Amino acid sequence: MNTRGKPLIVGAYEHPGRELPDKSLAQIHAEVALGAVADAGLTLDDVDGFFCGHDAPGYGGGWISMADYLGLRNLTYMDSTESGGASPIYHVSHAAAAIAAGKCKVALVALAGKPRTGIQPGGGGPVPPEESFEGRMFGVTGLVSSYALSAKRHMYEYGTTSEQLAEIKVAATIHASHNPNAFLRKVLTVEDVIASPMIADPLRRGDCCVVTDGGGAVIVAAPEVARDLGRRSVKILGQGESGKLVNGGRIDLTYTAAVWSGPRAFEEAGVTQRDIDYVSVYDSFTITVLEILEDLGFCEKGQGGNFVSDGALVAPHGRLPFNTDGGGLSNNHPGHRGGITKIIEAVRQLRGEANPGVQLDDCELALVHGNGGDLGTRMRAATMILGREDA
């Protein structure tokens, strides 16, 4: 269903906390939900659609327990699609489709996590069929090892360097220095990143995201609701979803599912890469950003290292400013899934509400991309293109 420009994002809120030992996961969910509806000029009584992933604690993929906890008594549509870090972008897309189909009018999309000071739900479940082969025989025991494989292969195929990957972290730290809530606010140099401890060759600590508590929420509403709010809204112009499989081992580690989700979003929005002013790109690791930018078509495959160099990603005047809140690399990565913060910062940029040091002068179009799973193997991707309401 093409929902171009119909449902709008009318509210957004990011929890200011990064270490929340005295709050339960349910409390964090409630605080971001209340923050988002207040930002929109609504209340929880107005919400009739609820979207969350398995980060939400409780029954029904979390939504039943959290709906009860929040007192969402008027729900007519619920969705607990689980796609890791891409989940919130899936949820906004699904909310837009549900609103366009008349299933609900005001949708709450919420995410919260406590991996820094508590236990993060959703990590268990049945053992996947590949575990005995990949994990036990070859030692692929966590995301960092599989992402390191992708980085190593990209370096082998295209000559990408650790210094080029470090440029992505440097840009993130510059942006985080303007954000009073960012977990890491110290500006790093390429040399600082290269000097940080090796975690999984070739990825160093500086190439890895932060681990934080926190969360965020957004409100998607029907046009007739948005009209009466008196708040600048953000248009949802295009969306794309995709997944990548290993194809029985015949796999290229240097590309992601963005090669499919990106074109779908651009086609639906009716724009091209040249039209995009700002990108919110999932940044679990520096290699994640580099491969996704290539796969979304902002540069040729293999040229990502050159593309991100020389301050290209630094706001407000770089070639393609990215993650101006500091992103998962420096600001906030709640619950090991940063998709919600990517949406929120894109909304801030389009509203002209980003931190002054990184706010773009005339931001009309933003791209948001989320990634879930392993970068080069089994993974899910979601791409969304947003537009300023008056653009």
Image (cartoon, rainbow, N blue to C red):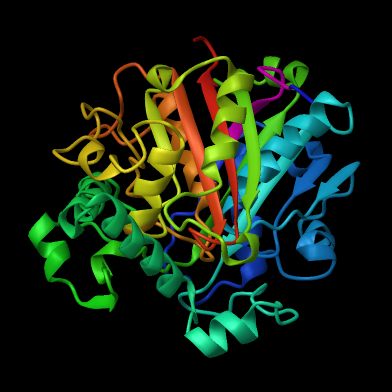
In front: 149, or 277? 149
Instruction: Left or right? Give the position of 176 relative to 224.
Output: left
Q: Position of residue 286 (x, y in %)?
A: 32, 56
Identify the magenta region: 3-11
**The N terminus lies in which quarter of the figure?**
top right
> For this view, does 4 lie left or right of residue 315?
right
Identify whether 74 is placed above or below 205.
above
The residue lying furthest to the front in this view is 250
Residue 106 belongs to magenta span: no
Report x, y in % for residue 292: 43, 44
User: Can see residue 189?
Assistant: no
The residue lying at 45 percent from left, 60 percent from top is: 333
Residue depicted at x 59% and y 51%: 86
Position of residue 100 relative to residue 153, above or below, is above
**Residue at the (42%, 59%) spot, across then down:** 284
Q: Quadrant of residue 200?
A: bottom left
Query: How many numbered tags mark residues here?
Result: 0
The residue sitting at the bottom extreme is 136
Q: Among all residues in the image, which is located at the extreme top? A: 390
Name the side, left or right, on which 384 lies relative to 291.
right
183 and 262: which is toward the camera: 262
- Measured from the top left, where is residue 52 in percent x and y? 71, 54
Q: Position of residue 339 (x, y in %)?
A: 53, 49
Residue 192 visible within the image:
yes
Would you say 286 lies left or right of 128 here? left
Q: Is residue 10 magenta?
A: yes
Q: Nearer the viewer, residue 280 or 216?
A: 280
Residue in view at x 69 percent, y 14 percent: 227
